[in-house]
Image (tube, rainbow, N blue to C red):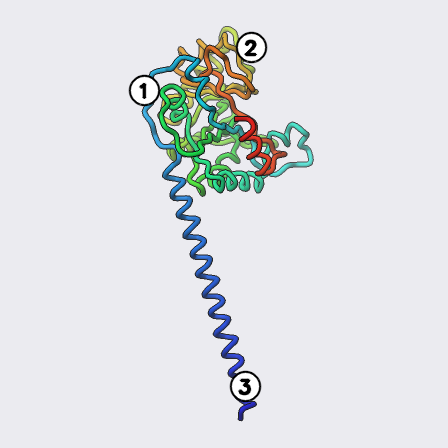
Amino acid sequence: MKNFFLPIIASAVIFVAGCQSKSQTSQTADATDSTTAAVNTEQAENQSAPIDTKNIKVADAKTILARPQVPILCYHQVRNWRSTDGQMGKDYTVEIQNFKDQIKMLSDSGYNTILPDQLYAYLNEGKPLPKKPIMLTFDDTVLDQFTVVNPTLKKYGYKAAYFIMTVSIGKQGKFVNYMSADQIKQLSDEGNTIGSHTYDHKNFKKYTGKDWEEQLDKPTKKLEEITGKKMEYFAYPFGLWNKEGFPELKKRGFKMAFALADKRDENDPLMCVRRIIASGFWSPKTLHNNIVKSF
């Protein structure tokens, strides 16, 4: 009889232990999810909040240059590399999992995203920023910025600035597809910043005559019609600028312009705010090292 009950007792013990193990695993997973949700909620509360810049008084160049720079990253395509991608193509293209890992690294490192309005208020009047501020920017209207980037940023409560090249809106190319007007509006409605990146990416340093209308005025009008908001921020194609063009940007109401240079103009630093390319060759750790080193 004793031998008859032994297998039954053993099975019962295994069953109970298994249930306890599953229960403990479930509780651990729930606790992890709750902790992650709490962290993300806390970070979201520190993220880019709307700010009124209308009454911000522009500071002198010396004051602006004296303030510690905020790290600003520039992304283009976020997709997996193709066999046809060359060195430069890979440099400007961050693979999907690597991008997700980079953003997770920023979140785990305590970075909080800010938007151009916050940067403008900080540089001019020293308005407070969240702890470990960083700005994420995306150029060229590429569709994966909506399908891959936006959901990834939302996961961490992050916001970004998207600089739109209007010639490409809604276009489908052989290798690259672009965002539609509705998708651009959605990004804007969700609290991201939409800025101008010209009509067709013509080098800013070569503008003459009607270029100012074609590359600045018409794109501005189109983006304002799409978003219902005033365009106040501009990103230079190729990151290239010249100070002779600053007055043209200012008279059109642009508050700041974003470059890719290692220097800022000593007389007008708001018109050449520094960014660095987030290279497709960089791991999250390398990205972090470059953020610290560059800013």
CA gap between label 1 and label 3 equals 81 Å
Could you tell me which secondary element the residue under label 3 belongs to? helix
Could you tell me which secondary element the residue under label 1 belongs to? loop
Place residue 118 in its image quadrant.
top left
Q: Residue furthest bottom?
A: 1
Query: Which residue position is annotated with label 3?
Result: 6
Could you tell me which secondary element the residue under label 2 belongs to? helix
Question: Position of 80 compared to 122: left or right?
Answer: right
Give the label, 2 or 1, closer to the camera. Answer: 1
Query: Which residue position is annotated with label 2?
Result: 206
Query: Which residue position is annotated with label 1?
Result: 54
Residue 10 spot, x, y in % from top left: 53, 80
Q: Is residue 150 visible?
A: yes
Question: Position of 86 compared to 8: left or right?
Answer: right
- Looking at the picture, which amino acid does disc 1 mark? Lys
Residue 120 spot, x, y in % from top left: 40, 22
Q: Is residue 183 visible?
A: no
Q: Do labels 2 and 1 touch, CB within 8 Å?
A: no
